[in-house]
Image (tube, coloured by chain):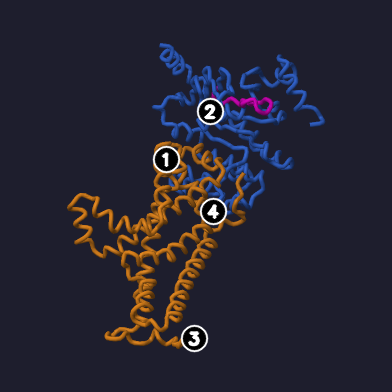
Amino acid sequence: MVLHRYTLFDTTESTMSIIRFNAVNKWFKDLHVLKDVNLSVAEGEVVVICGPSGSGKSTLIRTVNQLETIGSGEIWVNGQNVIDPKTDINTVRADVGFVFQHFNLYPHLTVLDNITLAPIQVRKQPRVEAEALAETLLAKVGLANKRDVFPSQLSGGQQQRVAIARGLAMQPKVMLFDEPTSALDPEMIGEVLKVMKDLAHTGITMMCVTHEMGFAREVADRVVFLDQGEVVEMATPAEFFSAPKSERAKQFLQQVLSPMH
Amino acid sequence: MGHYQWNWAIVFEQVAGTKEYYYQWLITGLGWTVATALCAWVLALVLGSLVGTLRTVPNKWLASLATCYVELFRNIPLIVQLFLWFYVLPEVLPKSAGFWMKQDMPMPEFITAAIGLGLFTSARVAEQVRTGIMALSSGQKNAGLALGFTLPQAYRYVILPMAFRIVIPPMTSEFMNVFKNSAVALAIGVTELTFQMRQITGEYAPGNPIEVMTIVSVIYLILAFSVNRLMALIERRTQVPGYISGGGK
């Protein structure tokens, strides 16, 4: 059976790749938004997904922790097939941090409680421990003095840094970023990117949808270029930015890198 | 009615042939009004929150079941619902249960009124709770799920705390309504405030209906206004610093 063969194949390989897409397809009604995507992310790798808007980048990254379901194919995360109904998706998600474009902090909780809620409720960590970790993380993202304020009292850049700390508090194996700087005022993009760069250097696995090509060039191990739901190119940043192979990637790079933009 | 004899002191007069005073009747009535309304409100809050939440869950069966509940209880007039619970239900139940309702159930009028009003109000509360949940961005739910919360946990810790804050103003109206709607309980014989008013102005002191009705109206007004102030206090206490409601991209 085809399915069985894939299963064997993947469990043996799972030590190498922490995320793996096998022939993933997704449709929104008649719209084919992900076309036969094959992609794997190795442990410790930083992968940037880029592409024009509507190319399916956000959909792709949301399928990793099943915030979006898929039509066909398999997705393996930390050695578990997230498509399999027998997989406990909540335990998979607990090990996968997710940073949203619009931060999505819990508005009714303080910064500290935003960070400790999941460790306490999901991981059953003692509060003291969770708070100690939260404070360490807040210091790392440069917001040690903001532990007791509410999200609405923070700037967008600060909220996004809290959101990153919230994801890290679960001590995840992978961090996913879905256009983390797209909703920010230009002057706040730098502070969030700095946190992300620091994070990339810690050796955590990162998958990041972004238009920040400077970030991709500097810290990505690989760039995946997506267009109309297809993986068109997959290369090191050096290759991708200096010598894109496809016409579509060339066009895209011209648009995002042009000084007028 | 040219020679209306005003007598505001009527409420302090003794009821003919008894040792009781009219004001005592009004206080008893007030007691039943408050008891009926509060019991109904507790029931409405619990059931309404549950049903309103279920209307928003991904499971289609649960959501449609909750929708049926809401449509059933909010589309039949309250007074008809009370009649159905009080007069019809005992007849259609198995014999022994119907017999128990008619013979042995303690305080049948009060309990039927509290449950009937509670169910009617719960449908309205459910709609408010659902609206509050829908007003939150889907990002809130996803932010919960992405961190490994189960769906019930996401509701408990992330979605409902904000949804309830958002719907405090419309819930204030519902809470006030439950006091005013409790007057309908007189139709099945609960001796609440409006029942007492009708009894006094009908049989006992037919000469001074305006005074009695005015006093009863003022009591309702004070009740509703107190509820309004209480809810305003709760709203202030639960306010999230710096959060402007209706926000959330």
State which quadrant residue A35 falls in: top right
Mark 3 or 1 closer to N-term?
3
- Chain B appears what colour? orange
Q: Label 1, on which residue?
A: B64
In primary-sequence order, the first of circles 4 and 3 is: 3
Q: Please indicate whether residue B186 sits to the left or right of residue A133 in the image.
A: left
Seen in the picture, residue B157 relative to A41 is either above or below; the reply is below
- How far apart marks 3 and 1 lie (CA) works out to 59 Å
- Would you call the spot at circle 3 few (<14 residues within 10 Å), some (14-19), or many (20 or more)? few
**Amino acid at pointer 1:** Ser
Q: Which residue is mark 4?
A: B166
Q: Are marks 2 and 4 on the same chain?
A: no
Residue under pointer 2:
A63
Q: CA distance from mark 2 to mark 4?
A: 31 Å
**Tag 3, which chain?**
B
Q: Which mark is residue B240?
A: none
Q: Is residue A47 located in the magenta-colored stretch of the structure?
A: yes
Host chain of mark 1: B
Q: Amino acid at mark 4?
A: Ile
* Residue at mark 2 to residue at mark 3: CA–CA distance: 81 Å
The residue that label 3 is drawn on is B2
Q: Secondary structure at mark 1?
A: helix
Question: What is the span of residues highlighted in magenta in the rendered image?
Answer: A42-56
As drawn, B155 above or below B178: above
Q: Are marks 2 and 3 on the same chain?
A: no
Q: Residue furthest front?
A: B2
Q: CA distance from mark 1 to mark 4?
A: 24 Å
Quadrant in which residue A49 is drawn: top right
The chain coloured blue is A
Point out the frontmost of discs 1 and 4.
Answer: 1
Tell me which residue sits at (74%, 42%) in the image.
A187
- Alpha carbon of mark 1 to alpha carbon of mark 2: how far? 27 Å
